[in-house]
């Protein structure tokens, strides 16, 4: 996803801190629904995303009755 597309699309992520948000958006994740396609471990591999951000993301996903993909 190029920067122009990211700028025109609304980012729908909880407040997880600027480094984690930047890491997710740079990887192309701008909304919670996209995170259902990846595992927690894949997200943790992104520089700037730590356990606290993943915990907050998990809580936000659960509120929408969603979850990260299961480890295979």
Image (tube, helix red, strand yellow):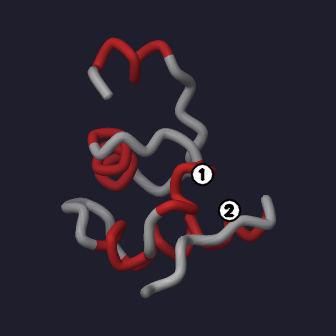
The residue at 28%/40% (across/down) is 26
Q: The residue tagged with tag 1: helix, strand or loop?
A: helix
In which quadrant will I find the N terminus? top left
- Dot label at residue 60: 2
Between the C-alphas of marks 2 and 1, the distance is 8 Å
- Quarter placement of the C terminus: bottom left
Expressed as whole percent of the image width and height from the top left, the position of residue 57 reads 56, 65
71 vs 52: above or below = below
Q: Give the image location of residue 17, x and y in percent.
A: 41, 53
Q: Most extreme residue toward the bottom, as rendered?
A: 72
**Observer-nearest of 5 and 51:** 5
Residue at 50 percent across and 61 percent down: it is: 37
Quarter occupied by residue 3: top left
| Horizontal and vertical percent position of residue 5 | 39, 17
**Residue at figure coordinates x 36%, y 67% from the top left:** 43
Image quadrant assignment for residue 56? bottom right
* Location of residue 62 (image quadrant): bottom right
Q: Earlier in the sequence, mark 2 or mark 1?
A: 1
Residues at marks 2 and 1 touching, judged by CB atoms closer than 8 Å:
yes
> Is 57 positioned to the left or the right of 67 in the image?
left
Q: Is residue 16 above or below residue 71?
A: above
Name the residue that disc number 1 marks: 32
């Amino acid at each position: 996803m190029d920067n122009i597309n990211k700028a025109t699309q609304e980012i729908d992520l909880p407040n997880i801190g600027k480094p984690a948000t930047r890491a997710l958006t740079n990887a192309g994740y701008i909304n919670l629904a996209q995170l259902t396609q990846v595992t927690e471990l894949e997200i943790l591999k992104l520089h700037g995303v730590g356990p606290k951000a993943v915990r907050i993301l998990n809580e936000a996903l659960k509120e929408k009755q969603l979850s990260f993909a299961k480890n295979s």
